[in-house]
Image (cartoon, rainbow, N blue to C red):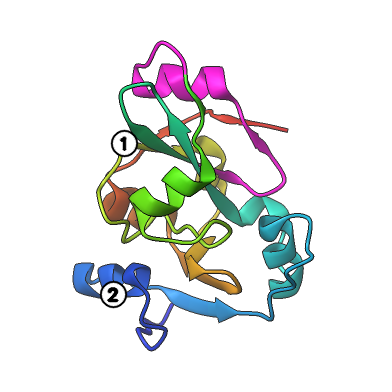
Amino acid sequence: MPRRDSAGTPATVALTSAGVPFSVHTYDHDPSAPSYGLEAAAALGLPAAQVFKTLLVDTGAGLAVGIVPVAATLDLKAMAAAIGAKKVTMADPVVAARVTGYVVGGISPVGQKKRLPTVVDQSAHAFRTVYVSGGRRGFDVGLSPADLLTVTGAAYALIARA
């Protein structure tokens, strides 16, 4: 995968700085799309299982990041167990945007303002390349699951529910 940093988002800057190979994938975002993630998979011609969305949860003591396939939902109980919290709720979108530095629908797990506890669904193992938001709507990056774990400090766990 060629490394390209021409997009200039915090995500691509972080990937380039870390020396992580990645590919960039852009598409025309439709603001009326009911699901940003499913829109990305369809627009890029990729299986929905290979495109991952970045979801923020509130632990009561701070935020954490769950990365799951776009066609799945985040299992909140499994996420709480994975990060050692009693329970988690979905983070307020305004707070998620402020804490990560990204707009909702374009939150990348990479290059966030502050490193948060992060968990990637174990299904990412099945792919040589996974796709996540590159830091804005209509822009994804492709990278290996191992590199995604490295640059985010994430761990694997079964956190997705079909």
Residue 104: x and y, percent? 54, 56
- The verdict on residue 86 being magenta is yes
Determine the residue positioned at 69% across, 39% down: 72
Residue 1: x and y, percent? 43, 77
In this view, which residue lies farthest toward the top?
86
Residue 65: x and y, percent? 42, 40
Quarter of the figure with the C terminus: top right
Mark 2 touches mark 1? (CB < 8 Å): no
Mark 1 residue type:
Pro
Determine the residue positioned at 46% across, 15% down: 87
- Local SS, label 1: loop
> Dot 2: within a 10 Å radius of its alpha carbon, few (fewer than 14), some, or many (20 or more) residues?
some
Mark 2 residue type:
Val
Provide the residue span drawn in magenta.
67-87
Determine the residue positioned at 28% across, 74% down: 13
> Dot 1: within a 10 Å radius of its alpha carbon, few (fewer than 14), some, or many (20 or more) residues?
some
Residue 147: x and y, percent? 34, 57
Is residue 104 or residue 131 the one in the foreground?
104
Which mark is drawn over residue 129?
A: none
Residue of label 2: 13
Of mark 2 and mark 1, the one earlier in the sequence is 2
How many angstroms separate mark 2 from mark 1 (CA)?
Answer: 20 Å
Q: 76 above or below 97?
A: above
Residue of label 1: 117
In this view, which residue lies farthest toward the front?
94
- The verdict on residue 30 being magenta is no
Is residue 27 or residue 56 the one in the foreground?
56
